[in-house]
Every structure is written in structure tokens, then in C-alpha cells.
Amino acid sequence: MIHCNISICVGCRMCEVSCSSYHFGAVSPGLARIRVAKLEETGIDMAVACLSCAEKPCLDCPTEALAVGADGVIVLDADLCNACRTCVEACPIGAIGFYRDRPLFCDLCDGATACVKACPSAALSYLEDNRETSLAAFPPVRGNPNQRRAQYVQVQGAPLRACWKNGVRVEP
Amino acid sequence: MTIYRGSCLRVDLSEHRIHRGDTPENGIGGRTWNSVTLLRELEPGIDPLGPENILCISVGPLTGSELIAACRFIASAKSPLTGYLGDSGARGFFGPELRWAGHDQIVFTGASDRWVYLLIDNDRVEIRDASHLLGLDITETTVQLRRELQDPDLQVAAIGPAGENLVRYAIISCNLARAAGRTGMGAVMGSKKLKAIVVRGDKPVKPVDAEFFKKVCVQLRKNIEGHGEFEGRRLYGTTRIMDSLARMGVLPAYHYRSTVFEDLEKVNARALRRDHVVKSKSCYNCNVHCSRYNYSLFSEGEGPEYEAQAAFTVKCGNSDLGLAVGVSNAVNRLGLDCISAGEVIAWLMECRHEGVISESDVDGIDLSWGSREALLRLPELIAKREGIGDLLAEGTKRAAAKFGSGAVKLTAEVKGLELFSADPRGIKGYALMNAVNSRGGDHYRGEPMIELTDNEELALRRVGHREAAHRWEEKGKGALVNYAEHLGLLSDSMTMCKNISCCMDVVDFDLAAEAYSGLLGKSITSRDLWEACSHVSQVEREFNLREGLRPEDDTLPERFLDRPIPDGPAQGTTINIRRLVKDYYREKGWE
């Protein structure tokens, strides 16, 4: 999985650019499998991609088009997918993209991890051990994917803001 | 030749009608399209705040691509502050989103009879009611629109109370603190009763020659990361300039009365980072991320950049950096240009110091140097046009005319636009840039940075004069300013961050030509781009001449011409602006 260190992410979205460019040779946030939530009024930025979470609610696919592949990534069988968006809506943190009738899952670029290489502040890293993070605390059906991603990042950012409030320096 | 013709959205706010067309055939994106549109479609002599004015918002073919920091949008209209051509760009994330929505330029004509905002969701474009947003500041407006449209990733360019109230130096701002700040484009937006532009887009920007384009992008990234100022800019952004300007002896302390600020260590970049900054922030697709987020229990936000930091500290004689940071946040939220607002306040303080106004002229507000009351109260009074704020909202030129000749002599503006935070006498290229450029008193049209480097080889290569590498030299400054103007115009067309393209000198016409060629899949030379920029620079001059500009308006404020720098490392330095302007005219072929 791709891990983002929220205390040093500056929100430049170079990860989105490199992801979309790597997979499609073109740039658009709609093509990216990693998305940056920028909570501008609180100064928090964080890139969010599939965490290979313990629950994997996305796997509950009506056409059984999804499976878990190597390294815990979600693998789509495009022939079986009917673009119903059930998986997109099931993800509690809005980490599944959708473009032109296909859901987009982080595939770790088959090991190339373009976003990690592109990240200029070293906020992103590739965690090989796939620690099976639980997302049980995040209700799956509140809001749309962008809103869920923002809610997730707001929770992740709370400790950082507490540091700021208490005057604790978080130096990269 | 036509290099790229984009799609243009025409929004008639009087009739609430929208139709689609093309951008002008001349131009290479961004400011070039806007200037051509305005020269062609505006009648000379119109009221900048009347419905006849046209507001153009544009991006360029490279915006939202993989090219680093191609992130700006350019807003242009006839300026309510100068009466000449106005334009200003903002970084952040709005520009790329507009490009991803498939629109290269938006041209707003007429004026709405009620407050509206424009919603762009790819091809769906709607004019919507904005009455519920009235009076909200820029942060509140952005947050409210993202909430009610249920998308926290929406990009919003909005005006604050200052724009609504037609303050002549109101800004259009995106991402809460990224402003198209100069020349009052927010007031033009307000005069059209347009509160915000909201964009969502996901159409890919796909280079035609992807492999070649990628190479150019990688090259630019290398140029930036290998640059000597890379680490300094990452840590401090533009605020690092304060110490440099102090060393050069051109700090504008106490509104240009001195170049020495005794409490420099309390207000400089290191102090800011140590006491107020909690993290770095970035614009779209940039590896420098030179912006910073400030946080205190009372106020938080992005910034300040050097201009706001200096304006609210050294220029106003204020040693309390925390106060200045809070004022910067407030000015951003209210929607005021920090350069003009800072200049208005500092000028008032000097007027009080010189005794040309009294406190009863300014609603009894304490105007002593560094006055906390003035710094806290004036921005809000100006933005809301309350009390003395109503006059100050007109800018220093108009306000000084009311206060009389003593106050006029203390102003620091060119063509009505307030000057930046540096003493032009000690930096001849910047002085010339302020005197001649189409916006008025402004350093950012294109940065003649080379004169601060002492790098003679670079100066020789770029402008053909070794002497141009030294800030105190007059020789070669006409050529330097002409080059810097072209590079600035190129940046405003590529919509690239000028801190990178102009200040770091990592983008030149060759690299730009390769970027355009790769993206568009056709052969575009640096000569083509230079000529496109030369053409539009003449268009801009023609616009201003048509509005009544005279050669004698290409000058500096009187206060810099009749006396030398009084103290500090550059003590005794004078400037002969006529000679510099002549040199520039010769370079332009305007004799």
C-alpha cells in the first residue's frame, strides 16, 4: 500500500499527476488512483490511495469482477465489470476512482510506484508489509467519495492540528 | 502563425446568456489572449466599473499538464485602479481545474442585476443565484460553496467584501489565499455582481508527443532541483528576500524614509518560520512548495509572502510579526491586494508623521508607526468602505488628491498602482520595470532578477550586456527590462509560476518552445514565442495609449527622483529615470 505522512504532505498533487500520467499518458485528477484531500481552511493536506484495508467492503461486487491480487491490491476483471459503481460507493475513504465506465484501483504500478517516486517532499512511501489497516471506524455510506475522503483526512489531521495548537514543532 | 486556439466561454451577465466560441487566433495562451480580446472589444474611455468593461479569465495550453507549476489563471480587464490595462494572475489549483473542464478562456460581458456565481462542471455551465453568499469573506464563500455543492474538491475563485464593495484594489482569490491581486480585478468582478466562479473538471490534458513532452518536464524538474536557491526557497519562499534587500540597502522601512529596520531579526524569514509557520504548502504540481501555513490560536492561513510580510512590518514600522501575520490573513479573507493595502496604510502613517493629515481626518485612528489599531482596523474599514475606509478604498492616488499636495508628495504609486516593498533607487532594473510596464507601479510584470545576481555571463547571454548583472548599473537595463517583460509575458501565457520561470531563471524561450512543441505535436520555435510576446506587448502599449497614456507617465514617484537614499548600505544612491526610460524606448523601437 501507499502510505502518506500527513505531517509533511504539502498538497502539491504531484502524486495525482504522476499516477494519471503513468497509467494514461495524460493528466487529469479523474484518471488518478491516488487523490489528495486538501482541507484548505485547516491547512491539512493528505494523499489517499487504497490502503488494502482489513474489511475490503469493495469486494462485495454484484458481478464478482473484483479479487485480491498480489501485494493486497484489488484486481478488476474488466470483462465482468458492469460499471455499477457499487465498489466506488462502498469504499469508506473514497479511495476508488472512476473514469469512463471503469473503477480505478491503486495497482502500485506493478511495483513502479510512480507517485512515491514523484513526491517532492518524501511524504509518500510504499509499505510492503501490507499491515491490513482497519477502516471499520469509518461509516461506508456517508456522502460521496470526495466527501468521505475529506472526512477521513480530517480525522487523520486532528492529531497534527493538536500539535500545532500545543506549539509542538513538526519539522520534516 | 496560430500556435494554439483554445475554446472560449462567453458569459453575458446582463442577459444571463452563455455561448461558446474560440480564443483569439493571435496569442499563445493566458495573458496574450486576454490582452488581444480587450484591445479588440473594449471601447476606449469606458468606466472600468461599468457594465461595458469586460473581464477575461484565461489559462493556456500547458495549464494542468505535467509541466511543473503551469498552474495559474490570468484575469484581465480595464483596471479601476489605473484606468489602463489591468491584469493579474493567481497560482494554486483553479487554473488546472478550468483547463480540465475544457475551457481555455472565459469572457464576462455586461453586468448582472442580481448577485450570481458561475458554475462550470465540465460542459455544463450555469449562472446561479449567489444572494446567500453576499458579505461572506473569501474563506467563508469557498467553504460554503464546497459544502452546498457537496464536493470538497471543487475549485472556487471568489471575491470577498472588498470586491463586493468595489474597492479599487480588490482581488480575485482561489484556494483561500492565492490571489490575482494587482490592478483591482476583484472590483471588476464585483461590478458585474459575480461573486464566484466554481469549477469541476476531469478531461485529460494529453500531450501529442508524450515522450518528448515528458523529457521537457523532467528537464525542468532537474533545472529547479539543481538550482542554488532551491533549498532556500523550499524553506522560506519569497520571505527570504527581506534579508537580501536589507543587505542591498533597499528595504522600504517607515514608508521609504529609511532602508534600515532595527528589528529586522524579529520580522524576517527565520523569525516567521520559527514562530509562526507550521508547515509548507504548495501550488499545483510544484516541487518547490515555497508557500507556508501559519497558525496561532487567533488566526491561521496560508502566507504571508514577502510583500505582505514586508508591507505590514518594515514598511509600517511594525516589529510585531504576529500582528503582521494576522493582518495578512485578514487581508486575504477580506479580498484586498496586500501590496496596495499595505502601501495605503504605510503611506497614511507617513502622512501623520509629517503632519499633513491629523487623526481627525482618519476617524481618530492612531496612525503612529506600527500602530496596532491602524493595522487591525483599517483593512476591514477599507473592505467595507466604512468611515475613512471609503476614501482609502480608492487607492493612494485618489485618496491623496483629497488630502492635498502634502499627502500627494508622499505617495509611492505609478499610474495609480501602488509600489512593491523595495526602494527602487538602489535597483535600477526594477525601478525601470516599475516606471514603464503596462500595469503601473509593479515589479512582477517580469522580474529583472539578473541584476541581483552579479552573474555577468548570464547577463551577457540573456541580454547582451555584462553590466546588466549589477543592480546599481544603468547600462543594459533597457535590454534587461525588455527581456524580463517578454519572459513575464511568456510565463503569463504558459500560466507558469513566475517565481520559478522568472526569478529562478530556469525557464527560457528554448525550453518553453520545446514544451509547446511536445504538447501540441508541432514544431514551435523560441523565435515564434518571442514574436508572439513582442506582438502582444505592443498590443498592451496600444491599449494604454488609447486610454490616454503619455510618455511622461512612464516615471517613478517624485519622492525617489529628487533625493538620494538617506542611509544604509546604498546611502547616497540616486536614480535618473528619464535616461533609463529612454534606453528602454530605444530597445522597444519607440523613439
Image (cartoon, coloured by chain):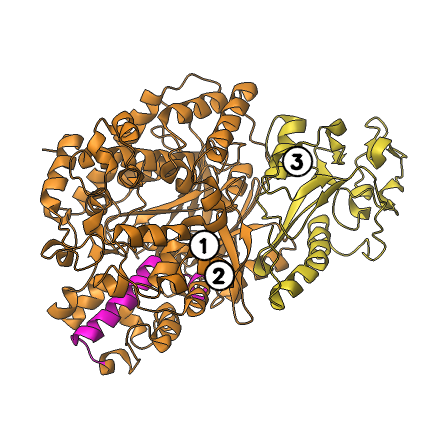
Instruction: Give the numbered dot on residue A115.
Output: 3
Q: Residue at x 63, y 41 (%)?
A: A122
Q: Position of residue A10 (x, y in %)?
A: 58, 48
The reply to whether residue B336 is in sight is no
Q: In terms of secondary structure, what is the magenta stretch mainly?
A: helix
Badge count: 3
Give how far apart the Cα atoms at labels 2 and 1 are.
7 Å
Q: Position of residue A115 (x, y in %)?
A: 66, 35
Using the image, name the chain to which the residue with label 3 belongs: A
Residue type at mark 2 is Ile
Give the residue furthest to the top.
B523
Q: Nearer the viewer, residue B452 or B365?
A: B452
- Judge depth for marks 3 and 1 and give the one in front: 3
Q: Quadrant of residue B246?
A: bottom left
Residue on which disc 2 sits: B138
Label located before the other in sequence (2 or 1): 2
- Judge depth for marks 2 and 3 and give the one in front: 3
Chain A palette colour: yellow
Q: Residues within 10 Å of mark 1 (few under 14, many from 20)?
A: many
Q: Nearer the viewer, residue B86 or B363?
A: B363
Chain B palette colour: orange
Residue type at mark 3 is Cys
